[in-house]
Image (tube, coloured by chain):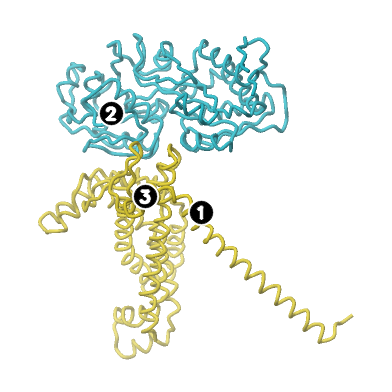
Chain colours: A yellow, B cyan
Amino acid sequence: MSLRGNDRHKIFKIQDFIFEKILFLFVLLFIFILVGLFLVLFKESATTFKEIGVLKFIFGTDWDPDEEIFGALPHIYGTLVTTTIAILLATPLGFGIAIFLSELCPKKLKSVIGTLVEILAAIPSIIYGIWGLYVLVPLMSKYVEPTLHKIFENIPILNELFNGQMFGTDYFTAGVVLTFMITPFIASVTRDALEIVPPVLKESAYGLGATQTEVIVKVMFPFARLAILGSVILALGRALGETMAVTFVVGNFPNLTVHLFDPGTTITSTIANEFGEADSDLEYSALIALAFILLVVDFFVLWVAKGVFLKKARKYNI
Amino acid sequence: MYKRATLVGCLFTASVAIGIEVNGAGSSAIAPLIQAWAKEYYKETGIKVNYQAVGSGSGIRMVSQRMVDFGATDAPLKPNQLEKKNLLQFPIAAFGAVFAYNLPNVDGLKLSTRAVCGIFSGKIKYWDDPLILETNPGKTLPHIPILVVVRADKSGTTYTVTSYLVKACKEELPFKKPSKKPRWGLSNLVAAKGNAGVAAVIQKKFGTIGYVEYTYAVKGGLKVTTLQNRDGNYVKPSLESFQAALKNVHWGEGFYADLTYQPGSNTWPIVGATWALLPLEKKERNKLVAQFFHWGFSKGDEKAKELYYAPLPKDVVNKVKVTWCDSIYLYNY
């Protein structure tokens, strides 16, 4: 039995309608989760904001649960410092790997190295943490940090940055572990972006006598910059929220210092360290307030990254 | 209203019952023991005991909100808190914390109480300090800085160690009361996450000293110090010296007690315990929990020793049983 065209058309219409609504439900679900997250975090942290005061909590430099003193600034500072180190180190590294993979790498090695980089991106963070503590921390305290300290000893500002106790568990090591975690993200997305640059563009540039460096820097990167910026923003998001790996190597000590070789803490590692043993209701609430602040910082950073940089990039697109 | 009972008439042994589950949560220090007990218990009775190692603080929170059948905490609640939350408290087992160190050519380091206090108050900065040399004649200690390794996370182990330090050192320390995460006030400090993290740092770094639960020192093959106890004797850490600490403990109301720095010639000075917390009004569930711990107290000693926990002495176990009898079986509202 065959259906008349009219009926078929009707069925397709209903199908489309249901399909569309289901997809819309999916989206709605995630909007609800996000809004719910915000509301719950805000509700649970209300005690802190009421009892301590919003500004006093955010700009408080002291954190002592025994005395019920809670200040978020050292934690926010630590999160921003480790993330900054990671982005500063990972961006050039990731770009370098991507360029090598898409332009310079012999064909045979290409897929092998590409897969290896992707595997690095999939390694659970606890493994980076354990590796960081057992392998990286001793190396940092014994060789890397003393060397850096010596190199920058006589340069103002930098000699303060590359200074501190040098026990290996500090802001710098945490930044380096984060670098290893986010570089694969930047590298693999950037590589994919560079690979879809139309050959015609590259060939025309070569035809005009451009060198390989010029082609990469002046033709391929501008063409792929949207995706590349996207990869950096994604990496930024991951670095801001990373918990386990950082907790293992950051030293876990609320510390407002410019010395990168001193122990510090981040929002996430403080929550991980203290949530299970939070005794008073105020402490519990203060930890949730930290989470709330992280969410706000996260939003703010992503908003700036997307709103400012992506817009600029889009404006000058070809 | 309230009737004091003898143990006769209180039936603690569970009959075989399939499909019943008991849920607990709290201290991670006691988790290996409860989980080992639960496995055996399940084989014998068919009753499943689930235990989540979420940390003492969360354990207290969860049992206060009646989310679990029992909580477990490394720092006991005071009687007034128990009353406020309507909880029953009793000890489960004790464990010792030890000082582990990394000095490759020095075995069997002996520390006097004065030396320990010197290290934790920041007065002793180098390994060849006269106070350390004094108790270690014939050993060559290097002139290198002492690096103190502590817990980065809030922990019951830290609470135990700091209550020992506060009692033993009195005025010298920067902190005045026991804490799960005190302000150490030291500059030669490394903080690592968990017992395993502290053990790892000590293992890797020359010149470190730090505290871990005994199990982790044994498992990690770390060198541990001999300590001077309250009676002035030098004692090696062992299950016997941990149990010796339990002999003279004064158990207060709700079994509130501080096990550190107890008198006794063979007593290890840094001993802590884990306490179970039960919601008083849930009599039927409490019977299941009491049956489980009764099984643990009577049949679980070997397992406990295997995992380096010090089982409770018989008289304490009997006191706990009397409490169960009074408050779970005969308590009237």
Q: How many marks?
A: 3
Q: Position of residue A8 (x, y in %)?
A: 80, 82
Residue reaching furthest right? A1
Three-letter code, disc 1: Val
Q: Is residue A176 visible?
A: no
* Amino acid found under the numbered disc labelled 3: Val
Taking the image as shown, residue B251 lies to the left or right of residue B109, namely right
Q: How far apart are marks 2 and 1 (CA)?
A: 37 Å
- Sort mark 3 into few (<14), some (14-19) or many (20+) by Cα contacts within 10 Å: many
Task: Name the subunit of mark 2.
Answer: B
Residue position marked by numbered label 1 in the rendering:
A40
In the picture, the quarter occupied by the N terminus of chain B is: top right
To the question of a shared chain for discs 2 and 1, the answer is no
Residue depicted at x 42% and y 14%:
B250
Mark 1–mark 3 Cα distance, whole angstroms, equals 26 Å
Q: Nearer the viewer, residue A196 or A104?
A: A196
**Disc 3 on helix, strand or loop?**
helix
Residue at 15% over, 56% down: A152
